[in-house]
């Protein structure tokens, strides 16, 4: 642990994950349950994350987590100060910029709160719903205002579409013929691990950059999958197989909200290009919703980048509407 001094404040850089986790709650509005610790520690160790603590007197008054991709980008998350003080935000932000410059990073990006599956990303835009929800941190707009004034720009705007979960039988949709396709999901952990490589391949080949928020996410699959199963069910991972070739051509991933058990979050869905426009997203959504309804899950939510027009159209067709927006910001050193 290193300690630095200024005229009014000191700040500490902490690298021990077991100590970092004791300070994380200062940086985010979402509760950090004891049951979440093993997932948090996994990501902290994987990314070799550090915490910058802003200290007033002897009391921590601001927090920022930092980690990198092993290349040129410094990521930050869990950025929050006591009472959302403008002065303290500016002091901590200056330290963040100084750290990135000193360590020769070319770019700073965030906030991304690892594990992002639980604690989400972005500064919340004013007008968003601010109830407790997994992956949806809450903050006043002063944070993004001060970051933008400092030279950051909006890298991605992530919009969260929400509403009552649609319930329909996809096989009765007259527009599509699913006779060549088989929807299925893993029945246990071993089967999920057998499907892991196909899930990763499909997502790597088909997800747009704006949907790949966390760096090196492939290596985090087991950690995130364990969270999804522990707080949900196996059907939250689902796949579509093309019968003529026996190849898996689409996949989706959902999770149950641990803070609101009746809510399901669509984390991602992908379809190979040659099978698009065949209604496979509706097949996955419809089949999954029927399974969810049996388990008394009746509310749906999904985050879509503002530039992802195809998934935006799907959300509209499902009757969802934008309830929250979060901004991921970026700064380039010159």
Image: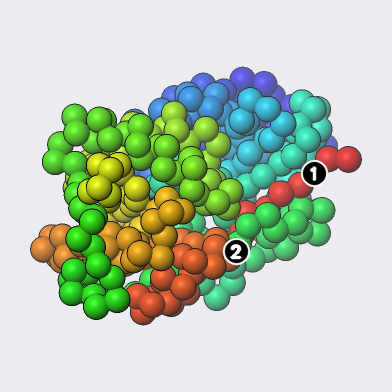
Q: In the image, 21: left or right of 262?
A: right
Measured along the vertical axis of the image, is residue 331 above or below residue 260? above
Q: Label 2, on which residue?
A: 307
Which quadrant of the structure image shows residue 112?
A: top right
Quadrant housing residue 328: bottom right
* Front one among 299 and 60: 299
- Along the polypeptide, which appears first: circle 1 or circle 2? 2
Q: Horizontally, is 316 left or right of 185 in the view?
A: right
Residue 212 percent coordinates (x, y): 53, 46
Taking the image as shown, residue 240 lies to the left or right of residue 76, namely: left
Determine the residue positioned at 63% across, 57% down: 156
Between the C-alphas of marks 1 and 2, the distance is: 21 Å
Residue at (26%, 30%) from the top-left corner? 193
Q: Farthest residue in the left direction?
A: 294
Could you say which disc has been placed on residue 332 in the image?
Answer: 1
x and y percentages locating residue 299 in the rendered image: 27, 69
Q: Which mark is residue 140?
A: none
In the displayed structure, 171 sits above or below 220; it is: below
């Amino acid at each position: 642990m290193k300690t630095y001094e200024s005229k009014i404040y000191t700040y500490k850089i902490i690298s021990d994950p077991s100590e970092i986790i004791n300070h994380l709650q200062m940086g985010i509005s979402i509760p950090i349950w004891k049951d979440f610790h093993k997932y948090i520690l996994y990501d902290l160790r994987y990314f070799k994350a550090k915490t910058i603590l802003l200290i007033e007197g002897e009391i921590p008054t601001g927090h920022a987590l930092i980690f990198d991709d092993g290349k040129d980008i410094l990521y930050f998350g869990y950025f929050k100060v006591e009472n959302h003080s403008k002065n303290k935000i500016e002091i901590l932000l200056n330290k963040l910029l100084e750290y990135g410059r000193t360590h020769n990073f070319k770019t700073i990006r965030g906030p991304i709160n690892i594990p992002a599956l639980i604690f989400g990303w972005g500064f919340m835009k004013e007008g968003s719903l601010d109830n407790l929800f997994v992956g949806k941190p809450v903050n006043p707009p002063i944070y993004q205002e001060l970051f933008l004034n400092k030279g950051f720009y909006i890298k991605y705007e992530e919009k969260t579409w929400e509403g009552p979960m649609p319930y329909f039988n996809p096989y009765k949709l007259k527009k599509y013929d699913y006779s060549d396709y088989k929807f299925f999901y893993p029945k246990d952990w071993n089967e999920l691990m057998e499907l892991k490589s196909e899930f990763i391949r499909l997502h790597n080949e088909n997800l747009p950059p704006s949907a790949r928020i966390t760096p090196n996410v492939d290596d985090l699959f087991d950690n995130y999958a364990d969270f999804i199963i522990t707080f949900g069910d196996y059907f939250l991972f689902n796949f579509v197989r093309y019968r003529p070739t026996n190849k898996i051509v689409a996949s989706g991933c959902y999770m149950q909200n641990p803070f609101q058990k009746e809510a399901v979050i669509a984390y991602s869905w992908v379809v190979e290009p040659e099978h698009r426009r065949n209604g496979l997203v509706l097949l996955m959504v419809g089949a999954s919703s029927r399974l969810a309804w049996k388990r008394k899950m009746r509310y749906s939510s999904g985050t879509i980048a503002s530039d992802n027009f195809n998934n935006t159209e799907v959300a509209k067709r499902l009757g969802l509407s934008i309830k929250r927006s979060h901004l991921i910001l970026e700064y380039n050193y010159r």
